[in-house]
Amino acid sequence: MHNLHITAQQIRIFEAVSRHLSYTKAAEELSLSQPAVSAQIKRLEENNDVKLIEVIGKKLFLTSAGEHMFKTCSHILDELKDLTAHIRSQQNKIEGELKLAVVTPAKYFIPYVLKAFLNRYPDVQPSITVVNRRRILSELKQNQYHLSIMGRVPPELKMEAFPFFKNELVIVAPPNHPLAKKGELSLDQLANESFLMRESGSGIRIATEERFAEKGLEIRPYMELGSTEAIKQGVMAGLGISVIPRHAVRIEAKYGHLAILNVEGFPLSRDWYIAKMQDKVLMPPAVAFLDFLKEVDINRLLAMSDTR
């Protein structure tokens, strides 16, 4: 037969009819009507100008061409079953690459989360890129990551985001700073202090400026630095004060290298989000990590790590 005309449905129907040698039993197996099965076999024969099944004494028999067709259809369906099983198996395996984009302040807790995750799923191969907010917005548009961790979900991008951890922003100062020795401070008392801040557009900076603006106050950064770590070192060096996530200074505060000030309206409580582009199809490692973040106690992980 040349230029065989056959559909996937006809392959399934012909294989069932040939195996049962019965239109009725094939129809029952495939949840079709008997006339529909007969019509498909007839159309298959007519479209290919070949006789595949003959009826003698009310019994069905395969012709020579029908025997060959039956073997081929059976082989095709077996291959499809193997392919389906393989795809499902791969989809259920929690292994392979996990590409995460993480804004810089999150680097102080994500390694501990990732370690706990890899203890459960050791075959996952993580790739973490620590970036500032401006860069992460650009690279998300290029579909470079499976998931992103950020403090503010950009409204201009179509993203699905899930809160998973509270981000407490505190105001820190060198331990010998005059404000460190005082009780509760008002925002007015801090407005003229030398603030070390992230670049314009940073989530922490936006939140800080919004809180001061609520009191009609504007703070002008004494110095802009490109990372939370640089700001933390700058505060410890005595260059000024700053607003930093509590988890980023937990060790320094514990050992007296930094002082967390008691300021009205602080700490600011914000959510950390795990986010993906709206139409992004997640592979098993990313799905597993998303589910893990929804159940893990990050504060407990950090407390367990703070034994230094």
Image: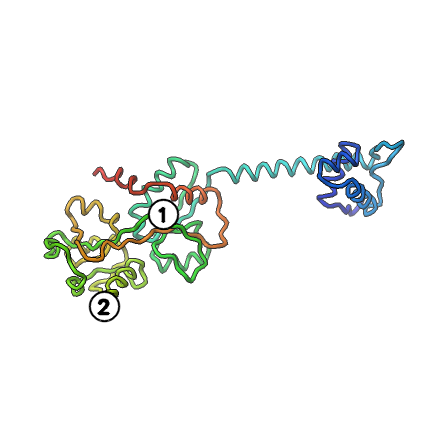
Mark 2–mark 1 distance (CA, rounded to whole Å): 32 Å
Image coordinates for residue 70, horizontal then vertical, percent: 76, 35
Secondary element under disc 2, as helix, strand or loop, is loop
Residue at the spot 79% in from the left edge and 32% down from the top edge: 21
Residue at the spot 46% in from the left edge and 38% down from the top edge: 94
Quadrant housing residue 195: bottom left
Q: Residue furthest right?
A: 57
Secondary element under disc 1, as helix, strand or loop, is strand
Crowding at label 2, few (<14), some or many (≥20) Cα neighbours within 10 Å? few
The figure's colour scheme reads rainbow
Residue where numbered disc 1 is placed: 164
Residue at the spot 29% in from the left edge and 47% down from the top edge: 108
Give the camera-side residue of 68 and 41. 41
Judged left or right of residue 259, residue 44 is right
Image coordinates for residue 122, horizontal then vertical, percent: 41, 36
Quadrant housing residue 154: bottom left
